[in-house]
Image (cartoon, rainbow, N blue to C red):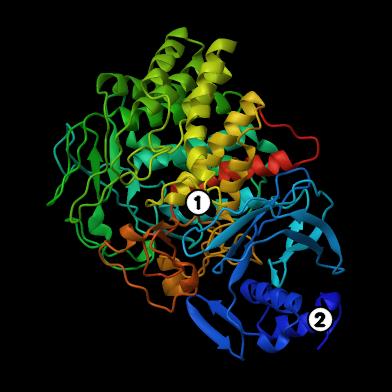
C-alpha cells in the first residue's frame, strides 16, 4: 500500500474520515497521524460528548508517541514550540513542519536536547520552529507521529478575551443574563459584625466563585482588578456586544468594563460604610448537590432559598460550624478592595465624575482599614476543613497603595507601597514544590508593576528585579523538563500558570528583557494543549479543539449548557488527588494513558479538583488573552 502522506488534505479521503467521526479534534488528530503513517487499516476513532463515549473500533496499533501543540495557534513573530513525548526510549534527530493544505514540508528542524522522562513518558523533546513565520495551516511530524493541525497567523488570538467574558457573565449572581432569571436576590444576613447577628442587608449581585455559589470578596476584588487592568492596558481588543445587564445589545461601553462594573457594584455593597468591610457571602453549606443558581433551595437558617450569611471582616478566626480559619487581620481583603476602587476611579474620571469620586472615597477608606488591622482575612469554613488559606497580605497593601498613588499623586502612598514591596519581594509559591490552597494569593504581585510604572529608574529596576527573581526560581525547575513546567501541581494550578505568564509579560513589557520569553510562552501554551494530555484547559476554546466537555458544573452536567471561556482548575499531584474526599470518576478516563503518579487531570464531572472552572482564574486569563491579542497585532509593542 503506498504512503498516503502525499495525498494529505487532498480530495475525499480525509473528508471521509472526518465525517465518520463527526470531525472531532481528537479524531482529526488521529486521522492526521494515521495518514502520515500510511496505515489506514490501523485506524481507531473516538468521539466524546459531555462525558459519553461513542467508539468505532478497528484493529489498530496503540500509539507510543505524540506531538503536543498550542491549539489556538502561533503568531508569525512569536515563539513557536511543540513538545514530542513518547512511552518508548527512542531518540529524535529532527522534525518537519508540514503545510496541511498541500502536504509539502515547509520547514525542517533539529530535535535538539532530549529531556528524558516526565510523568507517564519515557522520552521528550522541545521542537522549536520559531524562525518559521509564514501564515497558514500546518502540523508537526516526526516519523510516523503527527500533531493536530494548527494555524500560524496574526489573528489566532483575536476575540479570545471577549470569549472568556462569556463565563464571567454566566457566573453573575442577582440577575443572571445567561439564564435570563434572578438568583440569590435576598442576600444576606450579617454574622460577626458590629450590628446584631442576622441583620438583613443588601449584598446581592457579584459573581459566584466557581461551580458552587459561594462569593468571596478576595477573589471578586482580584477579578475586578484584572478586568479593569485589561481594559486600561488593551482597550483595542475588546468589543461592545452586550448591555450592562449582560444581555445582548451594544451600550457604548466595552463589555469588559461592563463586567468590571458588575464586580465594583458588589464590592461597594461589601464595603458600604468607611468602617464596614465584609469578606464572604454564604459558606460550604452550599455544597448540597448540583442545581442551577436560579433553583437554589439551600437553607442557611432563613428558609430554603432565602438569605445567606455575609461575614463581617473582623480580623479574627471565623467559622460557624466545626471548622474555623486562621484569620489575623483584614489587610489582605482591604488592600484588594483599595486597588480595585482606585483603578476604577482613574478609569471613570472622564466618564462619570460622581462615580469616580465614590470609588476614590471607597479606595481610601478600605486602605485605612488595612492599615488599622494588618494581617490576613481568610475565608470561613463550616462543614468541611477546606477554605482559602491566604497567608500573605503585604502584596495586597502594596498594590492598594500603588493604585492610590497613581490616582492621587500623594507621595505618602508611594512610600508605603515601596515599604510593602520590601516585605515580600517574590510571591512565595514561586520556586516551591507545593503550597496550601490559595496560600499565596493573588498568584502574582501586580503591585510591583504598578509601583514601577510611576517610579524613578532606580526603583523601577529594583522592583523588576523582584519579578526577575521569581521568574528565575521557576525557570530553574522548568528547564529540567520538555514542557518547561516549574509550576507546582496544587489546586488551581492553571490559575498559577496564568498568573506566572502574566508576570512574565509584565516583566518583559517593562524591561524589554526577552530572557524569560520562552518560559512565558510555555506557560501560555500549556493552557491550550502543550501538556501531557494534549487538551486545552478552557471550555470551548478553541471551538475546533480538544477542550473540557464534562466539567464539574451544574450548567453542563444537568442541562448540557456550555460554560464558554471557563478556565478549569487544572492538573494536581497524584498524591493530592488520591487523598481528596468525595472524588469519583463517572466515565471511562479518556486520558488514562497520560496519567501518572506525578500528576493527573480528568475531564470528568466527578473530579472537582482538576475540572472545576473558577471565576477569578478566568478573569486573570482574560488579561492574559488580551495581552496576547494586543501583542499579535502588526506593529504592536508590549506596554511599558
- In which quarter of the view is residue 314 placed? top left
Q: What element carries label 1?
A: helix
Label 2: few (<14), some (14–19) or many (≥20) C-alpha neighbours in 10 Å: few
In the image, residue 581 sits, relative to residue 437, either above or below, namely below
Provide residue 359's location: percent of width, then percent of height.
45, 26
Q: Can residue 260 be seen in this view?
A: no
Circle on res. 90: none
For the question of whether residue 508 can be seen, the reply is yes
Q: Is residue 622 above or below residue 54?
A: above
Give whichever of discs 2 and 1 has the lower sequence position.
Answer: 2
Task: Give the residue drawn at x 54%, y 19%.
Answer: 452
- Give left or right: position of 13 versus 376: right
User: Does dot 2 land on a helix, a strand or a loop?
Assistant: loop
How many marks the image carries: the answer is 2
Nearer the observer, disc 2 or disc 1? 2
Q: In this view, does 505 lie to the left or right of 389?
A: right
Image quadrant in which the N terminus is located: bottom right
At x 38% / y 44%, what residue is drawn? 433
Tell me the quarter of the picture where residue 99 sits.
bottom right
The residue that label 2 is drawn on is: 3
Residue at the location (73% across, 32% down)? 637
Residue 168, labelled with which disc? 1
Mark 1 Cα shell of 10 Å, populated few (<14), some (14-19), many (≥20): many
Q: Left of 538 or right of it: where is 4?
A: right
Percent from the top left, x then y, of residue 464?
54, 23
Q: CB of mark 2 within 8 Å of CB of mark 1?
A: no
Q: Which of 131 and 135 is in front in this view?
A: 131
Amino acid at each position: 500500500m503506498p504512503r498516503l502522506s502525499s495525498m494529505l488534505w487532498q480530495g475525499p479521503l480525509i473528508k471521509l474520515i472526518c465525517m465518520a467521526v463527526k470531525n472531532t479534534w481528537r479524531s482529526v488528530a488521529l486521522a492526521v497521524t494515521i495518514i502520515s503513517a500510511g496505515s489506514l487499516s490501523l485506524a481507531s476513532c473516538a468521539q466524546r460528548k459531555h462525558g459519553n463515549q461513542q467508539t468505532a473500533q478497528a484493529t489498530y496499533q496503540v500509539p507510543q508517541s505524540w506531538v503536543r501543540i498550542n491549539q489556538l495557534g502561533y503568531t508569525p513573530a512569536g515563539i513557536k514550540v511543540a513538545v514530542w513525548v513518547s512511552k518508548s526510549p527512542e531518540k529524535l534527530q529532527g522534525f518537519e513542519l508540514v503545510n496541511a493544505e498541500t502536504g509539502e514540508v515547509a520547514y525542517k528542524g533539529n530535535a535538539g536536547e532530549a529531556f528524558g522522562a516526565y510523568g507517564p513518558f519515557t522520552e521528550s523533546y522541545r521542537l522549536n520552529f520559531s524562525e518559521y513565520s509564514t501564515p497558514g495551516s500546518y502540523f508537526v511530524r516526526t516519523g510516523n507521529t503527527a500533531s493536530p493541525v494548527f494555524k500560524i497567523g496574526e489573528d489566532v488570538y483575536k476575540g479570545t478575551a471577549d470569549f472568556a467574558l462569556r463565563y464571567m457573565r454566566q457566573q453573575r449572581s442577582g440577575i443572571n443574563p445567561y439564564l435570563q432569571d434572578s438568583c440569590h436576590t435576598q442576600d444576606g444576613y450579617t454574622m460577626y459584625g458590629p450590628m446584631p447577628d442576622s441583620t438583613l442587608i443588601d449584598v446581592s449581585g457579584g459573581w459566584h466563585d466557581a461551580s458552587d455559589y459561594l462569593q468571596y470578596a478576595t477573589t471578586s476584588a482580584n477579578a475586578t482588578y484584572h478586568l479593569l487592568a485589561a481594559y486600561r492596558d488593551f482597550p483595542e481588543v475588546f468589543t461592545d456586544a452586550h448591555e450592562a445587564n449582560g444581555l445582548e445589545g451594544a451600550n457604548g461601553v466595552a463589555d469588559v468594563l461592563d463586567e468590571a462594573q458588575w464586580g465594583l457594584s458588589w464590592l461597594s455593597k461589601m464595603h458600604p460604610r468607611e468602617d464596614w468591610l465584609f469578606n464572604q457571602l454564604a459558606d460550604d453549606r452550599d455544597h448540597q448537590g448540583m442545581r442551577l443558581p436560579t433553583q437554589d433551595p439551600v437553607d442557611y437558617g432563613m428558609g430554603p432559598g432565602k438569605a445567606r450569611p455575609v461575614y463581617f471582616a473582623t480580623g479574627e478566626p471565623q467559622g460557624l460550624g466545626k471548622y474555623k480559619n486562621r484569620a489575623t487581620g483584614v489587610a489582605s481583603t482591604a488592600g484588594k478592595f483599595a486597588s480595585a476602587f482606585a483603578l476604577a476611579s482613574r478609569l471613570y474620571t472622564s466618564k462619570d465624575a460622581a462615580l469616580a469620586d465614590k470609588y476614590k472615597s471607597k479606595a481610601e477608606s478600605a486602605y485605612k482599614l488595612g492599615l488599622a488591622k494588618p494581617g490576613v482575612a481568610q475565608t470561613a469554613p463550616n462543614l468541611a476543613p477546606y477554605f482559602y488559606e491566604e497567608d500573605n497580605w503585604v502584596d495586597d497593601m502594596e498594590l492598594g497603595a500603588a493604585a492610590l498613588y497613581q490616582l492621587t499623586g500623594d507621595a505618602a502612598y508611594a512610600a508605603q507601597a515601596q515599604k510593602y514591596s520590601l516585605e515580600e519581594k517574590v510571591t512565595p509559591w514561586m520556586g516551591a514544590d507545593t503550597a496550601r490552597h490559595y496560600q499565596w494569593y493573588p498568584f502574582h504581585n501586580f503591585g510591583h508593576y504598578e509601583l514601577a510604572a510611576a517610579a524613578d529608574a532606580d526603583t523601577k529596576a529594583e522592583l523588576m528585579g523582584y519579578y526577575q527573581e521569581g521568574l528565575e526560581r521557576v525557570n530553574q525547575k522548568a528547564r529540567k523538563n520538555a514542557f518547561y513546567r516549574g509550576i507546582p501541581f496544587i489546586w488551581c494550578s492553571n490559575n498559577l500558570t496564568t498568573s506566572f505568564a502574566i508576570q512574565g509579560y509584565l516583566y518583559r513589557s517593562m524591561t524589554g528583557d526577552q530572557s524569560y520569553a520562552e518560559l512565558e510562552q510555555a506557560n501560555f501554551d500549556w493552557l491550550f494543549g502543550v501538556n501531557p494530555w494534549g487538551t486545552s484547559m478552557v471550555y470551548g476554546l478553541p471551538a475546533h479543539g480538544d477542550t473540557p466537555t464534562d466539567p464539574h458544573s451544574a450548567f453542563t452536567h444537568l442541562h448540557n449548557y456550555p460554560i464558554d471561556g471557563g478556565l478549569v482548575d487544572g492538573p494536581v499531584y497524584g498524591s493530592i488527588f488520591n487523598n481528596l474526599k468525595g472524588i469519583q470518576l463517572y466515565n471511562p478516563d479518556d486520558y488514562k494513558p497520560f496519567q501518572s503518579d506525578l500528576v493527573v487531570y480528568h475531564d470528568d464531572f466527578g473530579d472537582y479538583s482538576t475540572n472545576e472552572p473558577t471565576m477569578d482564574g478566568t478573569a486573570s486569563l482574560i488579561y492574559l488573552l488580551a495581552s496576547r491579542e494586543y501583542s499579535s497585532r502588526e506593529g504592536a509593542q508590549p506596554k511599558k
